[in-house]
Amino acid sequence: MCPFRFPSQNFVADRRSSMADGSTSPRSPSRSPPPAATAEELHQLNSTLRSRLARSAADLQAAATSRDAAVDHQHQFSLTLLRQTRELRTLEQLYDTRQAEVYVPTRSGTWNFGWIAISDRDTLQDQRDHLAEEVRLAGAEIEQLQEDHNDLDRARGNAEHELQLSEASLARVQASLVQAESRIAPPAIPPANAVAPDVDRLTRERDEARTAATDAEGQVARLRSELKAYQDMRRDAQTELNRLRSTHAAATADLIQTVKDRDAARADASRYRSDASDLQQQLASAAPSQADQAKQLDAANRRLDDLEHSVRVLRRERDAARQARDQALRTHETLQQALVAARQKLAVVASAVGIQPATDMGTSGPAAVLHSLRATPADPPGQQSGSSLPGGASVDLGGVGSQGDAPLSSSKRPRGSPTSPKSSPAPPAKRRVAPLSPDAGGSS
């Protein structure tokens, strides 16, 4: 953004050169007065010069008024821009202070999110530098406008001086015209030799007045061109002023956005701090519960060890019970074989004695055989207890009735119990061991 530059013009040099050109330039032959000039023509010429001078004075006054208004606008704009510059510097100082407050670590947990705040700080710093550069360029443009304003003041002073010179020359022309009018004699018929000198003198005065009027018109034309140049410069200055206002408005908007970003970053930092404090509180509150959980875990591990020991003991007991069961089964099978042999022997004895074996399965067995033996008559004295078979072979009763003198009828044993000591006792009750777990039976 380059500052505005007014075109350099040396009004004093231009005016002096124009005055020198006007003084050295010959009189135009088309503006030569007629040979006879009357007082009415001189009055008309004087009125024309006065009206032209009044118009030029009005134009110059309007130019001065416009110039003053432009200067006032520039001054107001300069004051506004300076005030906003001071406000911007105040905001920058406040921003630096708040940044220092934000980035001072209050607790150890705030450094976890410091890199986010650092990136936001760098971004805001770049924006602030950009705004400071814009303000510096705007200040340079304001200084340039003030210099141009001083140039305009000097040009106005030169134009006022030239106007005063023109008014003085016009006053001299008017005085000469008044003197010429006062010298005119009342209407009379002058002598022929006296008219020629007066006509020549009036003609010279008229020519001088026309020359002065021509010079005044040239000066008015130059003043009009200068006024137009002033108006163009004022228009350019107004355009530059509008551009500076728009630039200042954009800089203000950027500054507001920067302040908003700073506030957002500050809010984020506060939120991060609150999150960090909440996490620290949660960690502090979770420490006792974690210790309790560790104690519970140790107790559970000890209980699990006890249960595993109990499982091992129960497995050993189960193995021992299975071994006892297998031993009992083997004993039962042996006893069952012995019982079958005893039944066969009893059947042989019953057939030898002549007892009809019982057909009822519920009354069969050693008890039924012994009952049938009790029902038979006793052998005579001196007869052996063991009867001989028809073939001469003696039958061993297997201890049945070998009690000597004790009669069979005096036995107090229950009917269901076997009479032979060699008979197998009742098998022991089977012990059932319930498995501790679904996979306890498969692991044995």
Image (cartoon, grey):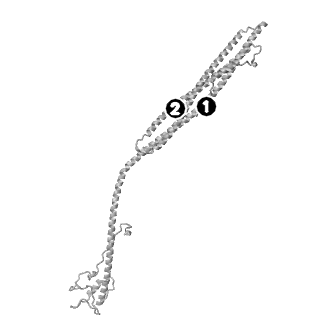
**Does residue 309 sit above or below 115 in this rendering?**
below
Image position, residue 161 (x, y; %): 62, 19
Q: CA distance from mark 1 to mark 2?
A: 21 Å
Residue in the image at 57% along x and 32% along y: 244
Label 1: which secondary element? helix
Side of 245 where 118 appears, left or right: left
Residue in the image at 32% along x and 80% along y: 336
Name the disc covering residue 85, or none.
2
Residue in the image at 67% along x and 14% along y: 172
Q: Amino acid at mark 2?
A: Thr
Q: Residue furthest top?
A: 191
Classify 10 Å Cα crowding around label 2: few (below 14), some (14-19), many (20 and above). Answer: some
Quadrant of the image containing the N terminus: top right
Image position, residue 218 (x, y; %): 69, 21
Say which quarter of the image contains residue 277: top left
Classify 10 Å Cα crowding around label 1: few (below 14), some (14-19), many (20 and above). Answer: few
Image position, residue 204 (x, y; %): 73, 13
Side of 86 where 431 appears, left or right: left
* Residue that badge 1 annotates: 239
Question: Is residue 55 visible to us here?
Answer: no
Question: Is residue 244 visible to us here?
Answer: yes
**Does residue 367 sit above or below 48 in this rendering?**
below
Q: Amino acid at mark 1?
A: Thr
Side of 428 where 183 appears, left or right: right
**Does residue 283 sit above or below 386 in this rendering?**
above
